[in-house]
Image (tube, rainbow, N blue to C red):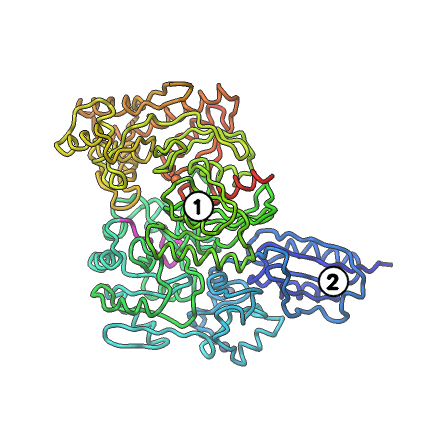
Amino acid sequence: MSSERSVKLNVLGVVQGVGYRPFVARLGRELKLAGTVRNLGGWVEIFVRGDGPRVEEFIRRLRSDAPGWGELPEIQSEEIAPELVPEGIFSIIPSGQERDRVPVLPPDLSTCPKCEAELKDPRDRRYRYPFISCTECGPRWTIMERLPYDRETTVMEDFPLCPACAAEYGDIATRRCHAQTIACHDCGPVLFLRTKQGQWETDGAFDEAARLLRAGGVVAVRDIGGFHLACDPNNSQALTRLRRLKGREAKPFAVMFPDVSSVEAYCHLSEPERTLLCSIPRPIVLLRKRRDFAPETCGVSREIGCMLPCAPLQMLLMDACGPLVMTSGNRSGEPILTENETMLELLKSDDLDGVLYHARRICTPMDDSVARVAEGRSQMVRRARGYVPMPLTLPVTAEKTIFAAGGDLKACFCLMKGDRAYLSQHFGDMEDPGVAETYRRAVRRQGELLRLAPERGICDLHPGYHSRAFARSLDVPLQEVQHHHAHIASVMAEHGLAGPVLGLAFDGTGYGTDGAVWGGELLLCEGPDMTRLGHLDYVPLCGGDKAAKDAAFALASYRCHAGLPAESPEAQTVRAAIAAGINTTPTSSMGRLFDAVSALLGLGTYNNYEGACAVALENAAAEALERGEDPAPAKFPVMERDGMLLADTGALIRSLTEALEAGESPGTLALSFHRGVIAMGTELMLRARTRTGVSAAALSGGVFMNRILLSGLSQALREAGFTVYRNERVPMNDGGVALGQVYLAAMKED
Ligand code: ZN
Ligand code: ZN
Ligand code: FE
């Protein structure tokens, strides 16, 4: 005789918007159990009653058969009195709200294979419907207005269901049961196209937009988190107009491809890269070029940022046009445009031919995410659509809600409560007033939706940072943390490390505790504490922000420091400024060293986008490697002064200059320089290990975007017996800083 059980279950994890409730109800009915399931502001609450072993099987399959993300939901269960479970057939009941828990909200989900099949099936009633979706796919976070996640709390409330859609919505047997985003030709959003010639609707709008794109036009397309600007990646004239429209000189454009095989025609694709490319978030994946588009698409870059379509409209465009440049619809440095009116205004520009738009509102602006695979492991470069607002679980608990302001470049904030850290999307450079406003609005919105009101704050030390000023304006107890300490802490957070670890931060710019510009740092990190053990020796750098763009400033400063003669009349002026201390700051930045060496070797002298000189230097080194060259590492000795380990940049610059004057090729020297930096980094870490006995190594900072440096140094450290950790789920660049900050604040509380 079997015993009856009555159980209440709380399921968390990404369970909303991926068809979890219908799945639960179907499972309950299949196992002939009584019960109910409902949303509770981000959680799912289940009451179930029936035969003991069947209830057990029910709980087991809740976990193993869960639709969606592949991430196992956490399930809490408690036995309850049988009368608490309603009699009768297992059913979905109206959503409720629970106040005291942080909801787990779904990110935007790419179109599922079932919807894609229907989209392309002439017999289906949603054939070619550009907004097809179901419980397993469609926009989520970008269209959510408030909690709990339901039809009327999203922008889909603007589109009342037609009878056919309503029937599917209420039918537990379909995968559109309780799918909040469903719609069809009859009841949902439709497409509009405006061009300089006129206005089109529905299929006509789509066909004319596709025709324009095929004919070399530049068309704005309203997508999930904002507008894209699209054009043919092989049409130089279209690309030139697009660059003018965006105010973007040279930074490579991302390209959307119809399918994996078309990606493979242009790029090398490893197995982990394929997995990343096809994953539900559909990020842009940086892949090694095999064949090129017009030079205006990716310029000198050895990689193409590739993505697959993640929305039905994009799938239709791919079918009609083939690969398209799909770049964020904004002016360079400004936030992505989401409003129809703003983009339609841009039609006045000679460089925009059409705007393909619709009336489904966008609540949260969101760029595409960017990721790559390095040494076989995926690594986030820009975390946004498809990942936000999924939390990261940390090995500490925050009793009070912590707000981490992040940095000013690649701004990104983080909210933390309990053991969950909610990293925001990437915003861009806070210097732009539009970006700063988007950031501020997002703090409010994310706080409201997650029901997290900041009670403590943490921000960067930099006195001029807008993010710091914002954190101060919140009027909560505020802690300040050094930029590179936060970088290393972001690695510790991801890997659950409390320390001690030896952190190597190779970075562009971060304000130091001594007021200098840091960026080539060896830090001993333990818990919330940090000790600086070493750095690149200080070089007086003239030019301030200008020096971060114009590598000639950097080169003149580094040559002056190295005791070499001035290379030009301009360099003579720089020297006079340094001697007088005008506009000059000591720096240990690895980023500026890369700029100086790039200029020294004549490979690149101007950063028309961030890291352009460093990319030129890396490309030259990669080409030397491909030619089979095997130069010795450039001389980059480590010295010790007052207990501080210092890398001698003067010796490095002198030896590179000598070799160049002796006729060595710039390509060979670029490789030799990379190897010198790897040897220097290894030497720093070995000396630090001798001192501290610590053999856990954490690598972070934007300079590690350099593949030769990242894999070379990781390998050298592993060979020397270090365990090497680095960022994977958050960017190594400043986009990961907020996670490090929040972790440091949480550790301080414990
Ligand atoms: Zn679907
Ligand atoms: Zn409908
Ligand atoms: Fe940084």
- Is residue 727 magenta-colored? no
Q: Residue 607 location in percent, x, y? A: 25, 42
Q: Amino acid at mark 1?
A: Gly
How far apart, in angstroms, are the residues tagged by discs 2 and 1? 44 Å
SS of the residue under disc 2: strand
Tell which of 70 and 228 is nearer to you: 228
Near mark 2 (Cα within 10 A), the count class, few <14, some 14-19 or many ≥20, is many
Q: Amino acid at mark 2?
A: Val
Q: Which residue of the protein is positioned furthest toward the bottom in this rendering?
A: 163
Q: Which residue of the protein is positioned furthest toward the right in this rendering?
A: 1
Q: Residue 363 location in percent, x, y? A: 45, 64
Tell which of 723 and 104 is nearer to you: 104
Q: Residue at x 24, y 41 (%)?
A: 546
Residue placed under numbered mark 1 in the picture: 406
Left or right relative to 284: residue 721: right
684 in relation to 271, above or below: above
For the C terminus, the quadrant is: top right
Region rendered in magenta: 251-264
Among the two numbered marks 2 and 1 on one chain, the one whose residue lies closer to the N terminus: 2
